[in-house]
Structure formats: structure tokens, C-alpha cells
Amino acid sequence: MALEPGWTVIHLARSEQSARVILQFLQKESFLARYRRIASGASGKDCYEILVPSGEAGEAQQLLIENNMLR
């Protein structure tokens, strides 16, 4: 799966619910963000990439860290 130009993956979520929580948090903080399913794990659960525009990746990731959103 090719990454679209201008977007950077800032986190891999282990469930769609977790991806949605992070996405909603980022959007509430005025970041353009999205997620997409990338693969099924060994247990049959999906993994999701959280993506933001490349120019905002550092700031968005730092905000997630500061707010204990990455678990």
C-alpha cells in the first residue's frame, strides 16, 4: 500500500476503536487527520495507521504523547 504524498503515519493503532478515539482527539485539536486499515494481525485483529499532513506530523505526535493518547 503506497503512502499518499503529503501524509505521514504518526501512530499504529491496534483496533478501529482506538484509531477513532485518536482521530477524534486530533480533529478536536484542529488537526486534519485520518486513519486506514493496513493489516490483520496474527490474532485476526486489524491494525490501523493514523495519518496527518507531513508538515503537522511532529506537532500532532507530540500532542498525543503529552495527552497520554498513545497506548
Image: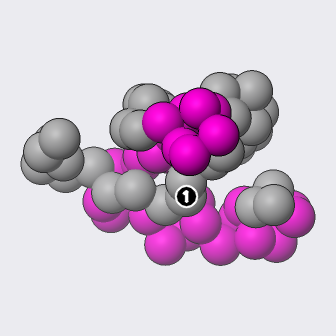
Q: Which residue is mark 1?
A: 11
Residue 50 locus on image (x, y percent): 50, 45
**Location of residue 15 with respect to 61 vertically, above or below:** above
Position of 41 compared to 6: left or right? right
Give the side of residue 69 with respect to residue 7, left or right: right
| Of 37 and 34, the residue lying toward us | 37
State whether residue 11 is above or below residue 31. below
Residue in the image at 75% along x and 71% along y: 65
Query: Is residue 37 visible to us here?
Result: yes
The one nearer the camera, 18 or 67, is 18
Which residue is depicted at the point 59% across and 32% down? 44
- Under mark 1, the amino acid is His
Circle 1 residues within 10 Å: few <14, some 14–19, many ≥20: some
52 within the magenta span: yes
Q: Position of residue 55 (x, y in %)?
A: 33, 63
For residue 30, say whether it is visible.
no
- Locate the C terminus by quadrant: bottom right
Q: Residue 56, located in which quarter of the rendered image?
A: bottom left
Determine which quarter of the picture holds residue 23.
top right
Q: Give SS at disc 1.
A: strand
**Residues in magenta?**
40-68
| Residue at 17%, 41% in the rendered image | 1
**Along the horizontal axis of the image, is 41 left or right of 26?**
left
